[in-house]
Image: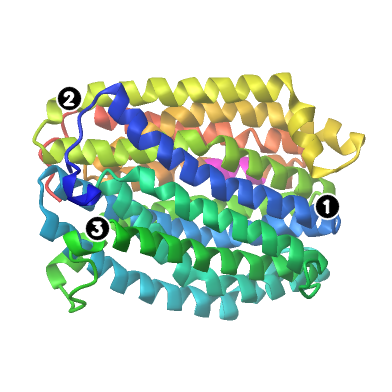
Amino acid sequence: MNPAQQSSLQVNISHKQILGIALPIAASIVVPQINFIINNIFLSGLGQRELGVAGITGVYYLVFAVIGMGFNSGLQTLISRRAGQNDEKGIGIVFTQAFRLVMIMSVLGIGLTYLVAPIVLGWAMSDTSNVDLAVDFLKIRIWGLPFLFIYQMRNGLLVGINQTKLLVLGTATEAIINVVFDYGLIYGKLGMPELGFNGAAYASILSEVAGLGVIYWIIKAKGIQKRFALLKDLKYDATATKTLLVQSSPLIAQHAISIISWEFFYILIEHHGATDLAISNIMRNIFGFFGCFTWAFASTTNTMVSNVIGQEQSNVVPKLIWRIIRWSTGFAFGVALFLNLFPELWLNIYGQDDEFIQRAIPVLRVVSGALIVMSFSVVWMNAVVGSGNPRIALYAEMGAILLYCLYVYFVLEVWNMSIVWGWGSEWIYWISLLVPCFWYMNTSKWKGKKV
């Protein structure tokens, strides 16, 4: 019998089960982050200007990527809930309707970039040459959006049905393809044309296509596509589509406003000069790379909480959450300790001078502490999402973002303080997000929610 057909769709709350789900997710997240870091290392060879602009274009594209993540979080919750109920047919229906929706989202994202990005970036950025560089890049990069959205969906499916070990091959393929074409297209190596900054855009698209192709092959080869009748009937299903939108819309809004606020932060940093912008781009790399385990445990929380509730075992949810927090925070403490003991080790890989590194170290110390706070917050937030109450997570996000934006505006723009204080905004954000989510999950309001 096929491995996909033998596996159980229901989970337990053991430490082995938690790590069995979380570690492959972490590996699948780490690989693209390594990919992104290598991308920035290649771009840093072009100069601090290109490295800084890469931060702004990266965050812009990340807005759309996290919209897909928000949609995928809602999809993953629904798949996990149906997995807990052993509803294989329901999983296939939800996945198929999700495919229809992400194709619409892709078209809107591409159109919006061509129409709006030049206006927004032209208004926000002080250097017109940076605007032209960023816009030209984004008009290429955005064509990878449909492949990214479908890739996220298929990853969400594998997490939701407890097949996380299958994630790694697709992401590894994506990383290898991106590194090869980054090197070739940015610098004109390996017989490829020298495209400079825009070469990174083409390399990223090619890697997304390759990653999606591998994941599609895995799902088909393992019998998962046949078992759940994925994309078998593309007819519009009003009930499933409404359920998806109800569950995902607050999460899309939540993720979008979170990253849009980060873009706002980067625009304010750009007003402080190329060096501060480049340092901040490196800090984003650190959040992305070293936060991989935290986000893996967050995704694990979402799927396991939803699955356990689907089994009608809501009473064990608090115990499950605290077990996941122990692992999440333990990894975060280890990362923070490493970064504070050996800050130069990480910063030296970007090939910048000693003055640059010394300016970056205090920022690194602030960021490393924020990673610990984040390790608590994202688990509680995803517990709220997994319980089937995404609007609560959205309300918490809105309050946290309001405080975050006010803080960075006054600190960076009005008072013109250093970016060390600017990055202190991460502490404000994660603590503000933690408090309402922790309170909500310690009430009984989330119990009995049907999705």
Q: Is residue 103 magenta?
A: no
Binning the other alpha carbons within 10 Å of mark 2 as few (below 14), some (14 to 19) or many (20 upward) gives some
Distance from the alpha carbon under mark 1 to that under mark 3:
48 Å
Checking the image for residue 274, the label placed there is: 1
Dot 1 and dot 3 residues touching (CB under 8 Å): no
Q: Which residues are magenta?
A: 404-409
In-image side of 23 versus 358 (left or right): left
Q: Is residue 405 magenta?
A: yes
Q: Earlier in the sequence, mark 2 or mark 3?
A: 3
Dot 2 and dot 1 residues touching (CB under 8 Å): no
Q: x and y percent of residue 257 in the render?
A: 47, 54
Q: x and y percent of residue 228 in the render?
A: 18, 60
Q: Circle 3 — which element? A: helix
Residue 381 makes an appearance in the image: no
Q: Circle 2 — which element? A: helix
Q: Earlier in the sequence, mark 2 or mark 1?
A: 1
Classify residue 54 by image quadrant.
Answer: bottom right
Q: Is residue 209 above or below residue 420?
A: below
Checking the image for residue 316, the label placed there is: 2
Q: Amino acid at mark 1?
A: Ala
Q: Nearer the viewer, mark 2 or mark 3?
A: 3
Residue lying furthest front: 1
In-image side of 125 versus 399 (left or right): right
Checking the image for residue 315, the label placed there is: none
Distance from the alpha carbon under mark 2 to that under mark 1:
50 Å
Classify residue 131 by image quadrant.
Answer: bottom right
Q: Amino acid at mark 2?
A: Val
Checking the image for residue 224, the label placed there is: 3
Classify residue 313 by image quadrant.
Answer: top left
Dot 2 and dot 3 residues touching (CB under 8 Å): no
